[in-house]
Structures are given as C-alpha cells and as structure tokens.
Image (tube, rainbow, N blue to C red):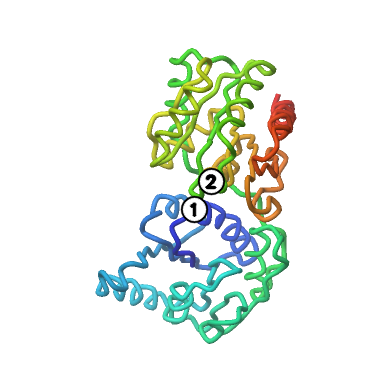
Amino acid sequence: MRVDERIGNLITLQSMIDALREGLPGLALGLLASVRVRRVAESLTGVDRLHLVDKRWFFARPARWFRTVRALRREAYQVCIDASAWHVFSFTHAALSYYSGAPVRIGYRREVGGAFHSVQVDPGPAREHELKQRMRLLAPLGIDADPPQLRTGLGLEGVEGWRGWLEDLRLGALRIGLWPGARKLERRWPVPFFVQLARKLQQRQGADLVVLWGPGEEELRDHVASAIREGVVTAPRTDLDELAGLMRCLDLVIVNDTGPMHLAVAVGTPTLALFASGDPRRWCHPYPHVRSLAAPGADPREVEQAAAAAARLLGRTR
C-alpha cells in the first residue's frame, strides 16, 4: 500500500515487489496506489490486482472511496503492508491499512497510530537508504535480504521513436540530458552551475545536450537552454512513458534529487544525481551506473566535481 502521488515513491516500490516475489513464490499480490499515478502503478510488474484510490475521495466522493475499500476487503488479503514513509505518520495509509480487513497489518513503529497495525516494525537509522528501510517491513514475513536493483518497463515501446527524433536533430554521438528542475526549490542546483557544467561537458566530452523538464518548468527549461546557447535542444512535452523512452536513448542524465532521478536510474541510463539538500545516502541508488554528489550550490568547485563524476560515468559506459 502506497497511496501518495510522488512518482519516485511508487517507482521505487518495484524493488519491494521483486523481493516479495522472490521470497514468497506463488503469492497473490495486490497493490493499493493513487489513481493520480495510475500509469506508474500499471508499469510495476509482479502485481496481480491493482486497486486505485484518491485520498480526496473521502470528503469529495465518499461513495467512491467506500466502493474502493469494499473491493479491497472482498479480496480477503491475509497481509497488508503499509509502505508509507517511515519517518512521518500518515493517517490515510494507517486507516486504509486497518479497513483493508487483513488480519496481519504491517507498519512502522511510531509514537502515534500503533493501533492501526497489528505488527509494528522498528525503522532503521535515519541515514539508511530508503529501499533498505522498506525491506524491514518484509522481515515479519521471513524475508531478510538486500533490496533487488531498481528497474522499470516504462518507455521500452517508445525507444525507436526517440532514437529517430535524436537523429533528426543531427546531434552528435554523445547525448547528455540535463534536468535542472525539482518539485522542491531547495533541491534545485543553481542554474549558473548547470550552465557551467554543460559547457565543460561540451568542451571536454564533445557532448550535445538535451534539457529535460516537467510540468510548470517551461520557464526554467528555456532559461537554461538560452544560457547554454549552442549544442543544446529542449525536449518536447512528455508523459512519463515518453520521458522514460527518451532517457533510455541518452548516454547520461544529470538530475537533481527529484522523481525523474529514480526513473533515470530504473531505466538503466547512467545517472549523476545532484543533492542540493538532503542526504544522498538515503536516496541515491548504490549501483555502478549511478553517482551521487552532495552539491548544496554554495561552492563553484562543485561544478568541477560534477564534471569529474560525469566523466567517470561516461568512461564506464564507453
């Protein structure tokens, strides 16, 4: 169960699903997720039945809310795993867990809300990686393992179309995507640093650049592209599938700590994650094709550090 609307939180649920499938072969697995991220939920493999809800329905459309709960209860699930955030209590998740009807309801131990879960799991250290934190929820089921590597099937069908798009633009052999945006402003690396990094990659690697963006980031997209001036194009408007397909066709994605960072990692594209705030140890993935950099945007030397990390990633893939 994960009903918030952040894309990264749902994409990263695939590792937990894979661990359940490996640890309990033959289980029937349902997923309760937000209807607003339906496409991500549908892309997760290993799910037998998908239940979709909107937390706003409780007040705005109560009949629809209760229909969803009744459908959930009809499945007679034996176990419900509340995979909401370990560090903050979510009444919505806790209540849905309780009303799922499952006799075993697993959730994190917190100062409040303990009555909703029949089995409470102690969270790990605050700096533990998020996927490892979630794996703790599987311990009561006898699953004690490292989280499987993150993956996704999003974007596979659109790869050929994006390759043609890139070829039509007559870009060079090395194509690097830049994602200067982020949902939270404090997670955005400064635009001047992004521009300086872009120029270094052009000069040293001979790279052509693709500015990636999401809804509401049009002005930021245009600002970055105009500042770089040459050897840069902006991606068209994309949905999540299209964005994943484009990322699969790039040689490297440089991205802030935001949902598309998890998507870039999951599709397998070499990824440099820039953490302007927060702790990289919690969120950046420990895979060979990923590098993380604590880059608060306060020191121009961060640009050189990012350029060196990008070169190392490109050296691996080459």
Residue 249 x %, y %: 53, 28
* Image position of 126 with respect to 259: above or below: below
Closer to the N terminus: mark 1 or mark 2?
1
Q: Nearer the viewer, residue 161 or 312?
A: 312
For marks 1 and 2, give the CA distance: 7 Å
Graded by Cα atoms within 10 Å as few (under 14), some (14 to 19) or many (20 or more), the crowding at tag 2 reads many
Q: Residue at x 64, y 34 (%)?
A: 270
* Residue found farthest to the top: 170
Q: Amino acid at mark 1?
A: Leu
Mark 2 residue type: Thr
Side of 55 relative to 106 (left or right): left
Residue in front for this viewpoint, 12 or 141:
12
The furthest residue to the front: 298
The picture places residue 135, in percent across and down from the top left corner, at 65, 65
Query: Is residue 160 shown left or right of residue 130?
Result: left
The image shows residue 290, relative to residue 61, as above or below, that is above
Looking at the image, is 115 positioned above or below residue 266?
below
Viewer-side residue, 198 vs 137: 198
Disc 1 secondary structure class: loop
As drawn, the residue found furthest toward the bottom would be 115
Checking the image for residue 31, the label placed there is none
Seen at 63% across and 70% down, the residue is: 137
Q: In what quadrant of the picture does the C terminus appear?
A: top right
Residue plotted at (61% across, 78% down): 110
Q: Secondary structure at mark 2?
A: loop
195 relative position to 94: left or right: right
Quadrant in the rendering for residue 119: bottom right
Q: Which residue is mark 1?
A: 44
Q: Position of residue 146 (x, y in %)?
A: 72, 59
Around disc 1, counting alpha carbons within 10 Å, would you say few (fewer than 14), some (14 to 19), or many (20 or more)?
many
Residue at the disc numbered 2:
152
Report if the CB atoms under discs 1 and 2 are less than 8 Å apart. Answer: yes
